[in-house]
Image: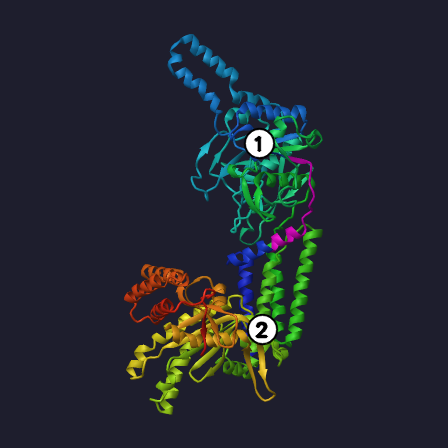
Amino acid sequence: MVVHSAVRLLFSAAITAVFVLHAGGWWPLPLLRQLENIAYDARLNLTLPGGVDSRVVIIDIDERSLREEGQWPWSRNRLAELVNLLFERYRIAALGFDILFAEPDSAHGVFGMLARGPLGEDVRLRVELERLRAELDPDRRFAAALRDRPVVLGYFFNTRATPNAEVQFGQLPAPIAAAHELGASDTVLIDAVGYGANLALLQDSAHGGGFFNSPLVDQDGIFRRTPLLIRYREQLYEQLALAVVRALLGNPPVALIMGAGYGADARNRRLEALRIGGFTVPTDELGAVLVPYRGPQGSFPYVSAHEVLAGRADPRLLEGAIALVGTTAAGLLDLRAAPVQSVYAGVEMNANLIAGILSQSFKNQPAFAAGLEIFQLTLVGLLGALLGFLAPTQALLLAVAAGGALLGVNGYLWQAQALVAPLATPLTLLFILYVLHTSYNFLVGSRRERRITRLFGQYIPREIVEEMSRRGEGYSLEGESRRMTVLFSDIADFTALSERFDPRQLTRLMQCYLTPLTRIIHERRGTIDKYIGDAIMAFWGAPLADSDHARRAVGAALAMVRGLRALDDEFRARSWPLLRLRIGVNTGVMSVGNMGSEFRMSYTVLGDAVNLASRLEGAARQYGVAIVISEYTRDAAPEYVCRELDRVRVKGRTQPVAIFEPLGPAEELDAERRAELADYEEALRVFRQRQWPQAAESFDRLLERQPDSRLYALYRERAAAMQAAPPPVDWDGVFDLLSK
């Protein structure tokens, strides 16, 4: 007992140590990080504020705008008109462009082309073209519309992790400050090595600029956070949402709130928050914030850009609002994955950030989060060590109570303090320790039960034994009706073969034959009902429900035929005759349960569907095939290619049934086998259309390919007999199977 307790404690300590190493950043585990992301998403979606925030309005370059105004990019003249309308007619408070203007308007180059062409040889014409280009330059008109207005243009930064990261084009806006001026020289910020910015003319005319991309995409491709600051050549640049808010507030300075580092970074100062005017925004050490999503896409008003240009937008919606120009059109590639929605407009992420700054609604992952996580894991590890010394019910109650306490404290910190505390890792550790100790107790204290399990496992799969053990008294004499699949297999002419063996040899042969076939059935989750001499009866779909019971049964039948052929060499070596299987499979509703008497029970199946499977096994001899399945099994396992054998009425059953031979999965059939199958199906069609001479010729040709085919010979004989004595006019093509 002492040894077992020591082993349990050792396992607990080792697992807890692994989690602590992850929490401290010494041995990061991607799976635990992903679980934490999932826990964050769940809390976020459960506590979304919802509703529509009308302080920020999205001017949407949507599919309708592209249809009405033309494909993107639009003329800068049209964009200038859009800006003028937003400020002069609709009286917005500030405007941000979640769009990059990196190239001159295409119309600007037309004048240059004309000046360089034949017309340019005329000096007066060339001068006039230059005058018109300056006067009608769309970029200048757009720049004039931006000038002296709170307009912020968007651009992007490249980090070392992106392809062609050092590419630089366009003009960056003025930085908010040099890194050393704000005390950020020694902080761990994101450093950029390249950028893609706007035309100098446009950027110089705008109030400012902000980057709209985020390099902080989590490993599952979801945007949960974004940096508000990026450092480039020791200068600090602001994110688009932050730039828009500063433009709205009259461009107040940005102050960095610094704190001491933790752990390995204790010597460096750590960024903890930004202060802009009267607003404080909590950040992590990278200067990033968790995006304060309000809800799914549509949590801010959307106004089609075409409606603004046409003068049909609602003035009450736009007056005094912050406007963001962006796109939801799929072809313009500004759609991202978010925790609240798998496809989410990038412009609305910026709208959430603006609203978050104004409402001070950011969740904060504090600097002490790692220390808090280690503390939680240590407590859970100590608590988990107690689980191994408690009774199963007590251990379960303690684990549930501890999990509830973790959820309660975490929920309080999330809602009341806006703190994002670790949740998934302590819960995962608690679950692992609970499973470890309960499993260990079960393995050590249940040797007798496991011995019984091994005995039962010779007849039914381990999964079924485990369910029977869990349910205990749940099994009774009363059966239940369930749709299942049943299989009967038999050795052809086994009675004659068995007369050649003495009892000891016959027992050995039966073991060599039944053991691999039983293993095949178990591997495909089948239950051995019974052995009937050389016959096997098995079923699928009980006690464990299995929607793939028909597919597994057909696969088992094919594997059994292959498995028997694999024994041929061993049988030859023993001078034993080679065996041939006959298998019948049927799917239908049958009664299943523990059936028998007070003295002996048997978990078995009964019913008409079971009887039909037995008849199909006997029919295999008549058609010269190894496997016969019913139309009901074929319909339930469509992935197997089947050859229709006949339409029959078995003894004791009035309803006819179509029977088939499964040939295997479609991908395993070669071209020659497919061609033969197509010829056979055509011959069968001609036969059923009462074209007896043509049918006889078709089956003769098939017999030339397969002279030993009993099936082809059978239909050849039937065609000749039908030609000599045609069946009645109302013949339905069904043949009677009068014997098993």
Q: Is residue 579 left or right of residue 15?
A: left
Confirm or deny contact between disc 1 and disc 2 (CB under 8 A).
Answer: no
Who's the residue at 68% across and 42% down the image? 360
Instruction: In this rendered view, identify the residue nearer to me: 53 or 161.
Output: 53
Q: Is residue 131 above or below residue 307?
A: above
Residue at which label 1 appears? 65
Give residue 260's position: percent from left, percent from top.
60, 48
Q: Is residue 81 above or below residue 494?
A: above
User: How far, Cα to Cα, is label 1 from label 2?
Assistant: 62 Å
Who's the residue at 36% across and 86% down the image? 496
Quadrant for the N terminus in the image = bottom right
Q: Is residue 638 above or below residue 37?
A: below
Label 2: few (<14), some (14–19) or many (≥20) C-alpha neighbours in 10 Å: many
Q: Is residue 252 left or right of residue 155?
A: right
Is residue 265 within the magenta segment? Answer: no
Instruction: In this rendered view, identify the residue nearer to me: 215 or 475.
Output: 475
The three-letter code of the residue at mark 2 reads His
Looking at the rendering, the stretch of residues picked out in magenta corresponds to: 39-57
Label 1: few (<14), some (14–19) or many (≥20) C-alpha neighbours in 10 Å: many
Q: Is residue 391 above or below residue 597?
A: above
Residue at which label 2 appears? 437
Is residue 56 within the magenta segment? Answer: yes
Q: Which mark is residue 522?
A: none
Give residue 200's position: percent from left, percent from top.
51, 26
Give whichever of discs 1 and 2 has the lower sequence position. 1
Give residue 282's position: percent from left, percent from top.
64, 45
